[in-house]
Amino acid sequence: MSTTGRIAPGGIFQDPDFDFSARIALGMASSGVSDVGLVLATLDQVTDGDAQSWFDAWSANGAALAAQGDAALAGGHLRSARWAYLAASAAYAKAQDAVDGLADQSVLTPTFATHRKYFDAWIDASEGRSVRVEIPYEGTTLPGYLLRPDATGAARPTLVMTNGSDGSLTDLCGTGATEALARGWNAFLYDGPGQQSLLFERGVPFRPDWEAVLTPVVDALIARSDVDSDALTGYGISQAGYWLPRALAFEHRLVAAVADPGVVDVSTSWTGFLPPAMLQLLHGGMKAEFNGFMAQAGGDPAAARTFAFRSRPYGIDDPYDLFTEVGKYQLRDVAGQIRTPLLITDPQDEQFWPGQSRQLFDLLAGRKVIVEFTRAEGANFHCEPMGRALTHLRMVDWLEDQLSQRG
């Protein structure tokens, strides 16, 4: 690892994916998910750009933490067990980050199962604070978890948290849930279509109309006695900066919400890498010609791995059909219907959807605020990975203000 310029691009690893994932792990430590020293010690075992070394280092970290949790649980030290189990779950989730670069990708299923095993162990060690909630959804259920500050069952404000394209449930714990709990709120985490357990275990792909997901979640929560049905708020991270606002165009029962960051058009993170000639083929409906160009580009192993990783949650193999489907993930047609007050984060150096937080802000007709996060604060880059404490304070302060103004 570099010893200088840790806030500048490439300051931790030269490989941009390793660098960003390392920053996320360090930032989550501010919420009690693992420890900064342990994260740095694990990263020191990683060879820059070597997926196998990343996978091995984080898997070893997870195994050691799981053993620590088991020992604490056997000794009756539930607080210690909870910390270790959550950190173990986060470590195995980090190991998953490198699977698409491994020669043997069959490790994905068992690694995910182990990650979720220790997340469930954390829930089970909560002394009744946290409970599983299955959300009825189109003939099946979505797995959800209601995290509560205590086991009294008192009705509380609840932050409904929607993940991005590849985030884990432990990521949500480190990106806002712990702050909600510290304020005496509940936090609700769940897997939606294309996310985590629904993708890895059931093969259910993404969908653009997230109101079909959020509305059943809200229905289930407002029926519970431990949820204040008049005090629901929402948070969407990464690609959920599209999904949550999309749902809010149709689902109006949340008092307020946060998009971190705002995403008006998901497809730009795909089409931005296409040359003008290919864009013309895509927009001109020339499927055979577009796929022919894509086949020529398939000779780059790294590009092929990235394409396979990014396309998997959409459940579409054909390149033209995939790009066409991703083009449906845009808010321009519905943003005017959003009337839920919305805070939009706007980090400097946004890598994936630069400028779109401001675009979303400009499209909204209702109550709105945009909050910049800066390099000087150490809170730049997509989703402010190393400025999470600052992000949590600003967003939950604002949500508290919206709750106090309701009615």
Image (tube, rainbow, N blue to C red):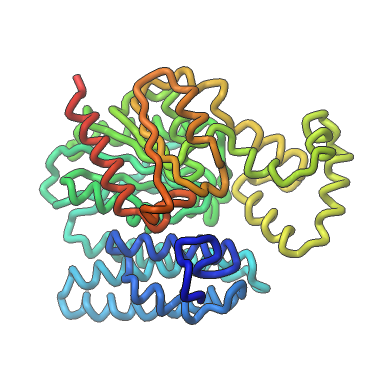
Q: Residue at x 52, y 21 (%)?
A: 334
Q: Quadrant of residue 213?
A: top left
Position of residue 235 in the picture relative to residue 363 (left or right) = left
> In the rendering, at what x and y percent does residue 242 appear?
50, 36
Q: Quadrant of residue 105?
A: bottom right
Q: Quadrant of the C terminus?
A: top left
Position of residue 22 in the picture relative to residue 69 (left or right) = right
> In the rendering, at what x and y percent does residue 335 appear?
49, 23
Q: Is residue 132 visible?
A: no
Q: Nearer the viewer, residue 189 or 381?
A: 381
Q: Is residue 298 visible?
A: yes
> In the rendering, at what x and y percent does residue 355 appear?
54, 37
Q: Residue at x 52, y 47 (%)?
A: 350
Residue 164 position (above or below residue 251): below
Q: Quadrant of residue 337?
A: top left
Residue 38 position (above or below residue 201): below
Residue 187 position (above or below residue 305): above
> In the rendering, at what x and y percent does residue 7 appear?
45, 61
Q: Residue at x 18, y 56 (%)?
A: 128
